[in-house]
Amino acid sequence: VQGPVTVTVTGAAGQIGYALLFRIASGHLLGPDVPVKLRLLEITPALKAAEGTAMELADCAFPLLQSVDISDDPRVAFDGANVALLVGARPRTKGMERGDLLEANGGIFKPQGEAINAVAADDIKVLVVGNPANTNALIAQAHAPDVPAERFTAMTRLDHNRAISQLASKLDVPVTAIKKLTIWGNHSATQYPDLYHAEVNGKVAAEQVDEAWLRDTFIPTVAKRGAAIIEARGASSAASAANAAIDHVYSWVNGTPEGDWTSAAIPSDGSYGVPEGLISSFPVTAKDGKFQIVQGLEIDAFSRERIDASVQELAEERDAVRGLGLI
Ligand code: NDP
């Protein structure tokens, strides 16, 4: 990658934004030699807080950071963007119906998709972090018809990293011993972390653990880790979410290592029975700035059921935003 690369971060004054921006500016998003221009998008009431973060970015005197611009206008913030990290979203509040949540997020991701379509760079890559991430990505994509569909992705890398860490700890091996882990489906409680294709020191992971642990401990622990961290910290897992966003884009831009893959929610081409167009998590490799779904994996009955359930949820979310006229 040659620089400078323009990176737009939405919700930049939030918790994830605070954990993300300093690592982007220090070269972890793209690589240690790539100059970066940061664009921070915030809603008007949060502009002052974003200015405070920009002051701290200046105070780090990062050699790679060429500029920081702040705006509450997507047409300004996405102008010339090469990478867009869509972090700001409307969280579900108590008593909120799913339809209200999707509608509120439609009000955010539709104009952002339109702005990306109109003003972003031709090579724009979009990662949606703000929840419901897969469906927010679908909304943004629907309003950017001139951008190749595969440039819209959503984050399941945090779930992927959590699954690797849980498995490594269970087997008392370093995280580097684990390869080919997959998160399938939606970034939600229905996600399916797959140990049947994962390898531990070259051996099938599912064969190294007992089935009861895999089904009754591992899967729910990974899926509910966010809630466990809120319970322990009294605040959400913003730093690990930011770290995963960095990992996702780094893999996308710089490629995945030979003999391994990662997990990302990308538009389905119909692989593994996932309806075409749904932004669903798959085992993916990355090369030359493109994600590709790993092909040819055999899916056992247990995995099939889990994948289908999560994909069904994604299809329902898609139908709901379609019903609201958001896509
Ligand atoms: P966070 O920075 O903690 O979270 C932002 C989004 O990321 C939420 O939708 C959150 O989903 C999601 N997320 C995904 N994974 C995780 C994870 N592991 N842990 C926590 N969050 C995760 O929220 P803040 O409230 O601190 O900040 C949001 C900022 O976005 C605010 O500054 C707000 O002003 C801004 N905003 C900007 C918009 C814009 O630029 N147009 C629009 C809307 C908001 P979940 O809710 O499920 O935790």
Image (cartoon, rainbow, N blue to C red):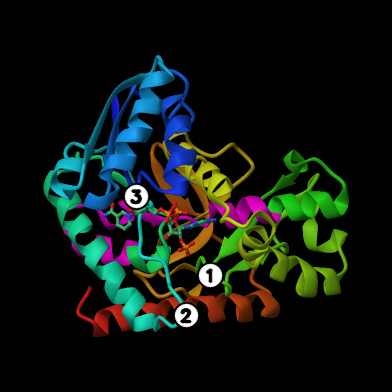
**What residue do we see at 39% from left, 26% from top?**
57
Spatial separation of the CA atoms under disc 3 and disc 2: 26 Å
Dot 2 lies on which element? helix
Q: Which residues are magenta?
A: 137-163
**Position above or below: 308 against 200:** below
Nearer the observer, 220 or 164: 220
Name the residue rendered at 46%, 48% in the picture. 15
Q: Residues within 10 Å of mark 3 (few under 14, many from 20)?
A: many
Q: Is residue 305 visible?
A: yes
Front-most of 120 and 290?
120
Q: Secondary structure at mark 1?
A: loop
In the displayed structure, would residue 299 be above or below residue 58? below
Q: Residues within 10 Å of mark 2 (few under 14, many from 20)?
A: some
**Which one is closest to the eye, mark 1 or mark 2?**
1
Residue on which the image places disc 1? 188
Sequence order check, earlier mark of 1 and 2: 1
Q: Which of pointers 1 and 3 lies earlier in the amino acid sequence?
A: 3
Whole-percent x, y for residue 315 in the image: 40, 80
Badge 1 vs badge 2, beta-carbon distance below 8 Å: yes
Label 1 – label 3 distance at C-alpha: 21 Å
Q: How many marks?
A: 3
Q: Residue at x 78, y 54 (%)?
A: 167
Q: Secondary structure at mark 3?
A: loop
Residue tagged 2: 313
Looking at marks 3 and 2 on the same chain, the residue that comes earlier in the sequence is marked by: 3
- Does residue 164 lie above or below 274 as drawn? above
What's the distance in space between the residues labelled 1 and 2, CA to CA?
Answer: 9 Å
Q: Mark 3 highlights which residue?
A: 11
